[in-house]
Amino acid sequence: SWSSRGITRLGEVRGPEGLLPFASLQDDFGLPSAEFLHYLQLKASLSRAEGLCPELLPTSPLVDIFQGLGGKKWGVSRINSTLLTRSAPDHNPTKQQWEKDLGHLVSEGVWEEALSSPLKSGTEVRSRLVQFRLINQLYWSPSKLAASGLRESTLCWRCGKEVGSLLHMIWVCEAIHPYWEDVLSHIREVSGVALQTNPLACILGVGLRQPNTSKLTARFVELALISAKRLLVKHWRQDVAPALKKWLLLMADTASHECVLMKARNKLEQFNKIWSIFLNKS
């Protein structure tokens, strides 16, 4: 494979004028002639995404670690030592982007709660991953695509009126207002929670566990909100927002998944307390 030859990122196969000739890669990395088809596939892919450049794809720290080992002894000990000395990722740029989008400062306490919200987004990996990507602004919004040269317009592809930032696409856009109104109304009705209509609560997952709200009810609200966000992400490129019925169906699927896992963990009683308010009224 290319990685076994030392090719782990685009910057190693690109030059000032684009992708390096295959002959150069053979000389530099010892690629066999049989890899020419993969080379052509890579070249075709890059030609369809002219804005994609090596700077957008930084090397993973794990790649640096494994390359540094180079077949040395005590690999596990070296990896463990390297991981322990790694500093935590810098979330300040992401925090500042959220502050810009929200139009106000975000306190450290609120930001820490937002960063921990993926762990409260259900037992499904997909749900946690959606929340993680939202918090870290990893989804390709129209404005992000335009900034990377992958799209001409920064405007939202739903309303076509405002800049399509991530916050706009997941919350602000007028085209998804009816969807959020229906979802939040249903959550309030079945849970009895006076859920705030703001992106801090609904998108960042902050302030959902109020003193007058039981932990199990707050848990249901968290699961209901992540289901709403999962559905919007699933319909990310569509012109219209999903219907409430689709959210109800996704909630039923989520309940089934949670039931299986909690039954296996001997927590079926807890599942019933969390989901009964929804299943009995739907």
Image (cartoon, rainbow, N blue to C red):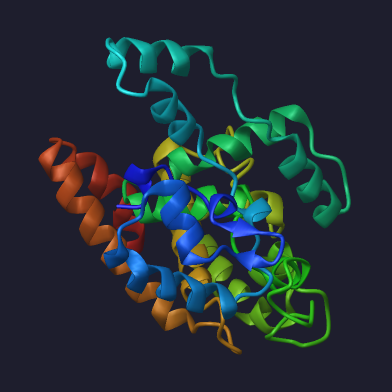
Q: Quadrant of residue 262?
A: top left
Q: Indicate whether 273 appears above or below 229.
A: above
Query: Which residue shows up at 47% across the image and 80% down it?
Result: 244
Percent x, y of residue 30: 37, 49
Q: Can you give x and y, in whole percent of width and height, for residue 113 in the image?
A: 61, 34
Q: Residue at x 56, y 81 (%)?
A: 237
**Residue 70, image quadrant:** top left
| 255 or 278, nearer to the observer | 255
50 or 174, which is in the foreground? 50
Say left or right for 250 vs 8. left
Image coordinates for residue 172, horizontal then vertical, percent = 74, 70
37 or 54: nearer the eye?
37
Horizontal side, residue 221 vs residue 95: left or right:
left
Q: Count the marks: how many?
A: 0
Q: Quadrant of the C terminus?
A: bottom left
Instruction: Report if residue 127 is visible in the image.
Output: yes
Report whether 227 appears left or right of 11.
left
Residue in the image at 37% along x and 56% along y: 126
In the rendered image, residue 165, in percent from the top left (x then y), is placed at: 75, 66
Closer to us: 243 or 49:
49
Q: Answer yes or no: is residue 279 visible.
A: no
Name above or below for residue 232 compared with residue 69: below
